[in-house]
Amino acid sequence: MKKKLFCLEIIIWFVIILTWLYFGFFHCFDDDEFQHCHNAFLIWKGLIPYKDFFEHHLPLYHVLFSPLFIFGAKPASIFLFRIISILASAGVFFILYRYLEKTQNKSIGLLCCVLLGFVPMYLFKMIEARPEPIAVLLYAGAVINTLSGRDDYKNAIFSGILSGLMVCFSQKYFFAFLGIFAAWFILKGKKTSLFFFEGFIISILLLFLYLLLRGILPEFINSTVVMNLKWRYRFSPAGYLYEAFITAGFLIACGIAGILTEFFEPGNRKKAIAILSLIVGCFLGIIVVPVPYRQTYLPLFIILTISSGTFLKSMSILIKNQKLKMIVCIIMVFCAISNASIKIYGEIHQTNRSDLLTMAKVDGISPQTQFFDGRCLLFYRMHTGYYGFMHHELLQMLDEEKYSNHIIEAIKRANFPVIIYDYRVKQMPAQIQNFIQQHYCAVDNSDIYMPGLRIDRTEFINGKKEFEIYVSGYYTISWTGGNLLLDGRHIEKNVSEFLDVGIHTLETEEFVDNLVVLLKRRR
């Protein structure tokens, strides 16, 4: 029987690992991933956050993992960051499994990890290239240390350092830290709580030391504190809470039942209150954060997994027959992950292939130049202007006219770099839209735009049309209709012609239409 259980355990872990690896390497990219990787790339290139480029996150993740670009800056670099996230996720599973194995038993530990591993919201955020997976690993470590560790000053300082580093990786988990601190105070008392807070301050001071040495403390405060406090765009957490209940309802129910079980266990009421304070800390973050996206919910799933172990253990005690236990366990898992499995299966076809193809296409069309877009898709290259990315939430915080003027001037200074006309660029102010339409043309009817212009046949006056070129290079001129002269010489359709910066003249005595002048290669 033990051998069969061991084989079953291996199979279950294999399925979890295979699922997470598949989505880690093939699931579609979140726009945040490009921004985090790009910030790390800029730091690797020697730029200073908040001063040389816009940043409104804490910089620890970007500073710590910027050396990943030592292997080269290329599209595949993003997978190195995803591997870090997957390793952090594996660390979370290991910590939870060992804790539940110790406090409950192996089977309960495995069952709880299965319930957590197939929560879509948790799975898809924890495999992404973002600081939250590292923060969740630190959160899990701090929580387990609080619930089961010694109450001496060394352990208190260690838990405080873990909590502080968690906040340094993701400031949105500050309220989760308050929950940990409250739990420590409840379980360990006032005396060691001071050492816990001391550990927290130590880790925060290291961040401030970096900011002081870089001379960017005022810019940091403005971008990460003042701006976030004044964040205008808000939405209700109800939508994502509904998603959590639909796809992880069983885990949530077991977690709540686990807290109630602790309350009625003799001598465990203090622990139950501590776990409740952890959940309150998580919910405070969800409610207070103006934009509670899925990554805000991740610590909550950790606490629910821990408290689920208590409830499932109490249920297993009621069932004496081992075979019946296994049957009940299988039924529970099936019921628990049925809705989640549908969601996960639906995401199989949401791959990152289109983004990778776009990167490759842009690299082929305009290699090694700066770029401009809204998503920061080409995270491994230099962006244009101060802002490496832009979205509607951030745009609401800026003066649109100043931002537009800044971007237009930056594009001119960068010698009209390639533009990826993504959905975020389409949300930008009309001044930027008009500038792009006047100075750029789409490549092969795609979202990739290169310097060029479209000329309507009505613009020809007495058979002539003068136009200005802003970037020296080889252009293809395409049109329908009769013959065309460029600067007095006959040209062929779709044949590269070198055009220098300045005014050029097109002439024709015949009907021409759909005329496009498009840069193919810079000088």
Image (spheres, helix red, strand yellow):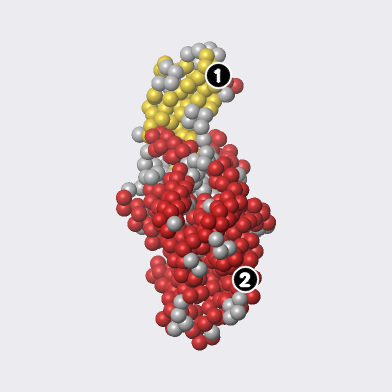
When the figure is inspected, residue 104 is found, relative to residue 453, above or below; the finding is below
Q: What amino acid type is highlighted by mark number 1?
A: Asp
Q: Is residue 372 in view from this perspective?
A: no
Find the residue positioned furthest to the front. Answer: 321
Q: What amino acid type is highlighted by mark number 2?
A: Thr
When the figure is inspected, residue 301 is found, relative to residue 472, above or below; the finding is below
The local secondary structure at tag 2 comes to helix
Q: Residues within 10 Å of mark 1 (few under 14, many from 20)?
A: some
Q: What is the x, y in percent for residue 382? A: 41, 48
What is the C-alpha distance between the residues marked 1 and 2? 77 Å
Relative to the observer, which residue lies in front, 6 or 226? 6
Q: Name the residue under label 2.
A: 261
Q: Which mark is residue 513?
A: 1
Residue at left offset 49%, top offset 28%: 444
Relative to the observer, which residue lies in front, 437 or 308? 308
Relative to the observer, which residue lies in front, 83 or 49? 83
The local secondary structure at tag 1 comes to strand
Residue at left offset 56%, top offset 47%: 341
Q: What is the x, y in percent for residue 134? A: 45, 61
Q: What is the x, y in percent for residue 47? A: 39, 57
Q: Number of callouts in the render?
A: 2
Residue at left offset 35%, top offset 54%: 68
